[in-house]
Amino acid sequence: MFNKKIYNVLTIYILTLLCAIAIVYADNQDDDINNIITNLEYIPKKGYMINMKDLRNYNLDSIIKENDKSKTKEQLEKLSLFSTQSIKTPDIWLDEWNKTGKKVLYERYKNEMTVPNPKSNETVYQLLIMSRNAYVPPYADDWVDLTEYGWDILIPFGWSDDSNDRIAKMVRGYIFENVRNNILVVSIKGTSAGLFGIGGPTAENDRYNDNMMFSCCCAVVDRIWKGICGCHSGIFNVCELGCLRDESRNYKNSYFVQLQPILEFVEKYRIEKNYEVFFTGHSLGGSLASLSGLSEMAPVMTYEAPGEAQFARRIGLIKTELHEVEKYKEIYNNVPIYHFGNNGDPIFLGKCTGITSSCYYSGFAMETKCHVGKLYMFDLDKNISNPDDPDNPDDDDDPIDDDPIDDEPVGDNPIDDNPIDKNPINNDPENNNFENTKSYKYIPTKQKQRIFLNNKSSIYEHQLYMKRSQMMKEENEMDPSFTPPSNPSKLNMLHHRVDYVIDLVKKWEGVWPTEFYQDECRDCENWNFLEGDASEENIDEGRIQQP
């Protein structure tokens, strides 16, 4: 009897204390959660108890609902435009979580996992804007604000007001947070290195990472180019594979290595705060996002990313041998990594390579084309809102078909009047001053007009085409028979630029791209990769591996 009285007193005391806490907290929150006490649950032999996790979730939901009362219907609709879907969790990820002891993630995703919806134009667009924002400082003049869609910056990384600061030359991007949906998105900046290093303090390291990640062997494109690591055998098309793996995992200024603290942070957030984590990026940033997703076993959406599958193998994120194509296809095609690109982008297609390409003359050894996961290809010939001219065929081997790399979202770059007169650029990061090149200057208007007539796909030609078309439309608006001049040819570095892609997605009126896989894709087919020293003796003994 005595124990029962004590038990009842304690129960009443605890209940009173909880009520007092609830009332005080409710007062502090402007009566957002006045009814919190109704969530108390009676448990036999324990009295009235409350789950603190439920309390926290209840508070958040209540605050959101209270804030929503002041929003218009249009504002509320924007907050719900980002869509996700559930898919079966890849077995390879479940096995890895189980093996590494990450039981929280294993239990959470053992049946299915949440991924961004690749069939939603709005979802693709919002992640693309985050990829674009990774190129500019926080809330700069050309920043595209996404707060009305529920996204805020949680952490910017790699940004510094001092361009000489070491941090300013490192990998850049943002972690965006959506509190309403419990989602973090890591957005990673792509290549800012335009022609001859234009592109800010990251330009040199951008190109160096591009050449390490997307070349076959240390950016040795031909006998003229000097390699940027010591793995080339000295025999032109033979590379030492073991050396290449070691170099790839920890080369100087590796962006993937620099991303590791960011990956550790979002992993902790994911586990402790029950958040979903997605990765995104454009160009080089997209490939780094894919590698990050493979590393953290999290969904990814990329835009115009170069082929990252080869580099993923080299650093051990794809655990199949180079020759096991069927095994690779079976295991890795189904991971939720979604690559968006268009069939006019030579970088995405892996066609910006060789002596006839602008990449070659701009110092970029972009030789890969194979991607991990699923691809969505925008066909420029089928874009109803702005179709490319179907009568103007592709010309993959024409050097004037491509423009120098420059992923920056704003501004113009100088362009030489005859870029193919240049010698290939020395890719040595310690000797990257382009001493053998003549200075560039902006092209006068008359010369732009000549380019319009002679160079069918330069950036300036495209800009002039758009301006001239508009002027001719205005001049001939009363003439119903008038048709503007045809668009530039399809394969064009303009189609790689992030602002072009944003405009493409935003105004797309054709059939949404269907999902496909690069089932039999092979990179570096003309190269031989040797385990061990690339000596004539080892080659004679047949120790060469085909990629």
Image: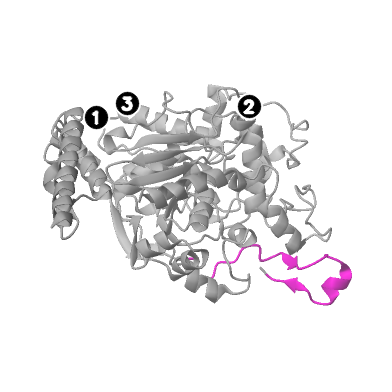
Residue 167, image quadrant = top right
Nearest to the observer: residue 504 or residue 523 = 523
- What range is drawn magenta here? 518-546
- Extreme residue in the front direction: 2
Crowdedness near tag 1: few (<14), some (14–19) or many (≥20) residues, C-alpha within 10 Å? few
Magenta segment's dominant SS is loop
Crowdedness near tag 2: few (<14), some (14–19) or many (≥20) residues, C-alpha within 10 Å? few
Residue picked out by circle 3? 475
Residue picked out by circle 1? 478
Asked if residue 535 is among those painted magenta in the image, a careful observer would answer: yes
Residue picked out by circle 2? 165
Question: Compared with residue 396, is residue 67 higher up or lower down, i.e. above or below?
Answer: above
Crowdedness near tag 3: few (<14), some (14–19) or many (≥20) residues, C-alpha within 10 Å? few
What residue sits 38% from the left and 33% below the top? 469
Secondary structure of residue under mark 1: loop
- For the residues labelled 3 and 2, the Cα–Cα distance comes to 52 Å
What residue sits 71% from the left and 50% below the top? 219
Residue 386 in view of the camera: no
Foreground mark, 3 or 2, reads 2
Q: Quadrant of the C terminus?
A: bottom right
1 horizontally vs 293: left or right: left
Q: Position of residue 385 (x, y in %)?
A: 30, 45
